[in-house]
Amino acid sequence: MIHLRVASPPEQTDQVLALLAGDGGVVDVVVHRGALHPAGDAIECDVLAGAANDVLARLRELRVHQHGSLMVDPVELTMSDRVDAAAVGLRGPLARAPVWAEVEARIVGDATATPSFYLYLVIAGVIGAVGLLTNSEILIVAAMILGPEYGPITGVALGIDRRSWLPIRQGLAALAVGFSLAVLAAYAFTMLVRALGLVPTAFTLGVRPVSHLIDTPNFYSVVVAVLAGIAGVVALTHTRTSTLLGVFVSVTTIPAAADIGVALAASSPAQARGSLWQLLLNITLLIVVGFATLRAQRALWGRISRRVLTRRSAHG
C-alpha cells in the first residue's frame, strides 16, 4: 500500500476527488480545502499497491502534476478491516505489483553520479588491483562490494525505455569517467608497487589465475552478465537491493576495469585488451538486458493488472 498526497489546484479538486472516490482500491480520502499557499487544496488517501499504477496514471492524465504535485510514501503496516475488504479483489500477484513511478524515481536517484560515486570506483579499482597482484579472490569480492556502477547502468536502460536522451548521455558519461578513473587508479597503484619492488613473485612469473578469469571474454561471461542484468532490475523493481546483489552485478565490471590498469602497468597489452573487451561487453549487456527486463516486467504486470481489474469490474 502507498500513501498518496495530492496538491490540487482548486478548480481540479472535485475531479480528483471523484476519481479517487470511484476507485475501489482507494481508501481513507481526506481533503483540506484552501490548505496550500498561495492557492490550492491538499488531498490525502491510501491506495492499494494493485491499484496504484492505474490511479497515478489517471491523475497524470488530469495533469494534476503540472499544476500541483503528486507525492507517494510507502506504507509499511496497515491494520484496518476496511482496507482488508478493499483488498479482496486485488490479492494474488497484483498485491505485490511494483509502483512504477516509485521504481523509476529510485532508478533516477541511484543513477545520479555524485563525487562519492567516483571515489568508490577509484577505491574499488585499487582494491581490485591488490587482489589481482596477490591472486586474492577475497579482495576481488571486496572491490565488487564497493562498486556503485549499477546506478548509471540502470539509468541508461530507463532512458532507452523512455526514449529520453538526457539520462542516457548522463549515465554513459558517468560510466566512462568513473571507469577511466578506476583504471587510472589501478595503473598508478601497480606502477607504485613496481617502483617499490613489491610485486609478488607469482605475479612476476606469470602465475595469474584471477586475471585469466577476467581478461578472457567467453560464453560464460556473457551468461553471467545477462543473469546479473535480469536479477538487478527485478531486485530494483521489488526494492530488494542488497550488498549481495551489488557483488553479483559488479562481478562483470569492477574486476575487468582493475585488470586493465594492472595489465597496462605490467606491460601486458594483450591482457589489457581482453579485459577492456570484457568490460565493454558486460556494460553493454547489462544495459540491453536491463532495458529488456524493464519492458518485459512492465508488460507482464500491465497484463496482470488489466486482467484483475476487468474481473473486478465484471463482479462489481
Image: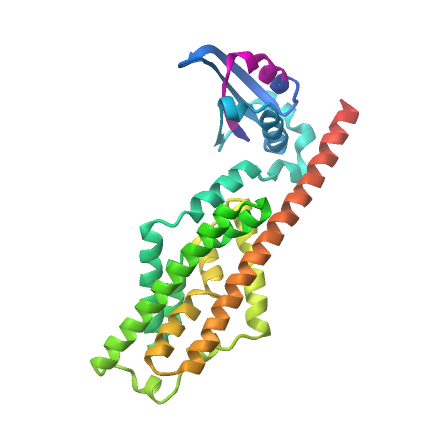
Residue extending farthest to the right is 314
Q: Nearer the viewer, residue 195 or 91?
A: 195
- Residue numbers of the magenta segment: 3-18
- Where does residue 164 sit, x and y in percent of width and height? 54, 45
**Image vertical order of residue 85 relative to residue 184, above or below:** above
Which residue is at a point 56% across and 15% down the rendered structure image? 12
Report which quarter residue 138 is drawn in.
bottom left
Q: Considering the image in quadrants, where does the N terminus appear?
A: top right
Nearer to the camera, 222 or 263:
263
Quadrant including the C terminus: top right
Residue that lies at the very extreme toward the top in this rendered image? 34
Q: Can residue 166 be seen in this snapshot?
A: yes
Q: Quadrant of residue 203?
A: bottom left
Residue 157: image location, x then y, percent: 54, 51
| Front residue of this view, candidates 276 and 244 | 276
Report whether 316 appears left or right of 268. Answer: right
Residue 22 lies in the magenta-colored region: no
Residue drawn at x 60%, y 23% is: 62
| Side of 188 where 272 appears, left or right | right
Position in image of residue 159 (x %, y %): 54, 47
The answer to whether residue 210 is above or below residue 241 is below
Q: Position of residue 124 (x, y in %)?
A: 35, 63
The residue sitting at the bottom extreme is 205
The colouring scheme, among rainbow, by chain, secondary structure or one colour, is rainbow
The residue shown at (22%, 80%) is: 195
Residue shown at 40% from the left, 14% from the top: 38
